[in-house]
Structure formats: structure tokens, C-alpha cells
Image (cartoon, helix red, strand yellow):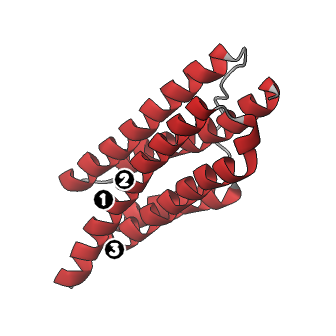
Amino acid sequence: MENQQTIDALNKLVQINNERVEGYHTAMKETDEDDLKKLFTQLSKTSTKNTTDLTVEIKRLGGVATEDTKLSGTFFRVWMDVKAALTGKNRMFILNSCEQGEDEAIETYNTVLEECSVNLSQNQQTMIKAQLDLLKADHNSVKAKRDALKQHA
């Protein structure tokens, strides 16, 4: 197992979590709706915890956790859509855009698990899978809020 490959894989996850934190902090500033602020706060907290745990593991391996947030153009565009939606105050568009961002985060985790598992210890894989479960729960929270809105339309 090569430490640098493991560090690089873990840093991909740090980046997507940094992106989520930044995106949801922006979203919190842009909305006046208390339920959305509460949702965005919870989603941000998930990624803050994930980043902390990943950073500890990266440091244990002798690496440095990235502070970068630009993992992919796709994720950046999703957050621009969220910002535009918040400015327009369209709840359905906001929640659809958030769900796209959550899909991107889940996809990143799945890719790391599939493509980098040979470089990850069993403990690291367990940590990543647990974080993925948290992201899926966050995704389901966004989806439930969006689906409830559809039912009232």
C-alpha cells in the first residue's frame, strides 16, 4: 500500500466535503427560510465532521489535507445553480440543485471506494463507508423535503 496514493484518495474526499461546506454556507447566507437554513446547517456539519476525520487519517499517514474546494466543474456549476435559485427564492429549484450536489458527493465517494480500494486499509474503507452512509442520509433529507413540496404543488 502506497501512502501517497492513499493520501491522494482521501484528499479527493476532503475536497468534496470542503465544497459542500462552502456551498451550504453560501446557501445559508442566501436564504431567509428557517427550515432551509436548518437543513443547510446540518448538511454542512456532516461535511465538517467528515473533513475532520479524513484530515486526522491523512496526517497519520504523514500527509497534508487539502484546503482546495474545486474538485470538479460539475459541482461548482451545481452550487451556482443553488445560488441562482436562492436569489430567485424558488424552493423546488433550490432543492433540486441541492440534490444534484448531493449526488455528486455520493458519486465521488463511490468512485474512491471502487477505484482506490487497493490503496485503502480496512479501517479507512470502513470510515469512508460510514461517511458515505451519512451523505446518503443527507441526500434523503433533501429529497424528502423536495418530494413533500411536490405533493403540495
| Helix, strand or loop for disc 1 | helix
Task: Decide which of tag 3 and tag 2 comes sooner along the chain.
Answer: 3
Q: Position of residue 151 (x, y in %)?
A: 20, 82
Q: Position of residue 93 (x, y in %)?
A: 39, 72
Say whether residue 144 is left or right of residue 17: left
Residue contact between numbered discs 3 and 1, judged by CB atoms under 8 Å: no
Task: Give me the disc on residue 99.
Answer: none
Q: Amino acid at mark 2?
A: Asp
Task: Give me the disc on residue 141.
Answer: 1
Q: Residue 152, located in which quarter of the rendered image?
A: bottom left
Q: Residues within 10 Å of mark 2 (few under 14, many from 20)?
A: many
Q: In front: 65, or 77?
A: 65
Q: Amino acid at mark 3?
A: Met
Q: Looking at the image, is 139 positioned above or below residue 14?
A: below
Q: In front: 44, or 127?
A: 127
- Alpha carbon separation for disc pair 3 and 1: 14 Å
Residue contact between numbered discs 1 and 2, judged by CB atoms under 8 Å: yes
Residue that carries the numbered disc 3 in the rendered image: 92
Q: Identify the residue at image location x=37%, y=53%.
A: 138
Q: Residue 130, located in which quarter of the rendered image?
A: top left
Q: Identify the residue at image location x=42%, y=55%.
A: 136
| Helix, strand or loop for disc 3 | helix
Q: Amino acid at mark 1?
A: Ser
Q: Number of labelled discs?
A: 3
Mark 3 or mark 2, whichever is nearer to me:
2
Say whether residue 120 is left or right of residue 17: right
Q: Identify the residue at image location x=50%, y=41%.
A: 22
| Helix, strand or loop for disc 2 | helix
Q: Position of residue 40 (x, y in %)?
A: 34, 48
